[in-house]
Image (cartoon, rainbow, N blue to C red):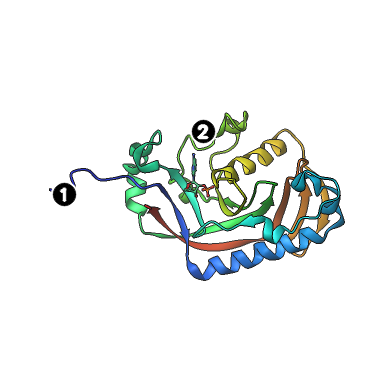
Amino acid sequence: GPLEEVTLPLFFGWFLLSSVQEKIRCTSMDFLKTLDTLEAFKKHMSDFTGKPDKEVDLEQYFEAKGTLHCTTKFCNYGKAEGAKEYAEKPAVKNFYGSIFELSLTALFVTPRVVGARVTLSEEQLVLWPDDAEKEAESAVPTAASLPLGSRAHITLGCAEGVEPVQTGLDLLQILALQQEGQQGELVTEMELGSLRYYGEGRWLLSLREPMCAPACFSSFYN
Ligand code: 2AM
C-alpha cells in the first residue's frame, strides 16, 4: 500500500486553544512593554544591545513563532533519539487528542527568547520524556539534577536568528541558578507578580496567579 510506514511527527506537545493564545500573547506583550520602561531594565540594556547607551524596543525585538504550544517530545520525524519509543508509550496513545489545563507560573525574558514556564501536574508528567532535562546537559551542565518537567515551557518569541529550542535551555539555566541558591535580585513587585534579575540579561516574573491554559495533546507535522 502507499502507507508502508507511519511517519513520526516533528514533535508532540500540548497546543493551546485559540481563545487562550490571544490572552497569553497580550499578557506577554504587556509584560515586555512594562519591562522596557523600568529603570532597572534600562540599567542592564546592554545585555540586549551589546552597546551601553543603545535603546531596545522589546516588543519589536522578539518575533512570534506560530501556534503557542508546550513541546513534550521533539521527534524530528523519527530522527531524534527516543522518538519511536516515546510515540509508542501507552500514555501518549491514550491521551492523544485530549484536552489538558496547563498552568503557566512564570514569564521569562533573555537576550535570546521570551517564554512562559509551565508547571506540569502529576498527570501531565506522565507525558513528559524521562530524558528531556538530561538532553540539555551540554548547554546546562546541572540540568539532569533538576526535577522532571523543569524544562516545560511555551516559546512566546525569539530574537532574530534564534531557534525556539533555546527557550527551554534558557529556562533551565535560570532554574539551575535557583537550585544553586541564587535567588536573583528582587527588582520590583508588579501587578502580575515579582520580577527578579539573574544577571546576563535574564529576567523572571513569577506570576502571583498562575494562568490556566486549556491545551490539546497532539503532534505537529510540517
Ligand atoms: P520550543 O518547544 O522551545 O518552542 C519545532 O521546532 C518545535 O520543537 C519548537 O517548538 C521547538 O522549541 C521544539 N524543538 C526544536 N528542537 C528541539 C530539541 N532539540 N529539543 C526539544 N525541543 C525542540
**Reading the chain from its start, which is encountered first: label 2 or label 1?**
1
Indicate if the residue with disc 2 has its beta carbon within 8 Å of ligand 1: yes
Q: Is residue 73 visible?
A: yes
> Residue 82 occupies which quadrant of the picture?
top left
The residue that label 2 is drawn on is 135
Three-letter code for the amino acid on which mark 2 is drawn = Glu
Q: Mark 2 near mark 1, Cβ–Cβ under 8 Å? A: no
- With respect to residue 126, does 130 lie above or below? above
Residue 197, given in percent of the width and then of the height, sits at: 78, 46
Measuring 76% from the left and 55% from the top, which residue is drawn there?
A: 56
Residue 51, given in percent of the width and then of the height, sits at: 81, 45
- Left or right side of 86 for 183: right
Count residues near mark 1 (Cα–Cα under 10 Å), then give few for <14, some for 14-19, many for 20+. Answer: few
The residue that label 1 is drawn on is 2
Q: Nearer the viewer, residue 56 or 211?
A: 56
Residue 23, given in percent of the width and then of the height, sits at: 59, 69
Measuring 51% from the left and 71% from the top, which residue is drawn there?
A: 19
- Left or right side of 39 for 179: left
- With respect to residue 73, does 69 lie above or below? below
Q: Is residue 192 visible?
A: no
- Left or right side of 133 for 60: right
Three-letter code for the amino acid on which mark 1 is drawn = Pro
Residue that sits furthest to the bottom in the current view: 19
Measuring 54% from the left and 36% from the top, which residue is drawn there?
A: 133
Q: Nearer the viewer, residue 37 or 194?
A: 37
Count residues near mark 2 (Cα–Cα under 10 Å), then give few for <14, some for 14-19, many for 20+. Answer: some
Query: Could you tell me how far apart the alpha carbons at marks 2 and 1 are, in whole angstroms?
Result: 35 Å
Residue 36, given in percent of the width and then of the height, sits at: 78, 59
Q: Secondary structure at mark 1?
A: loop
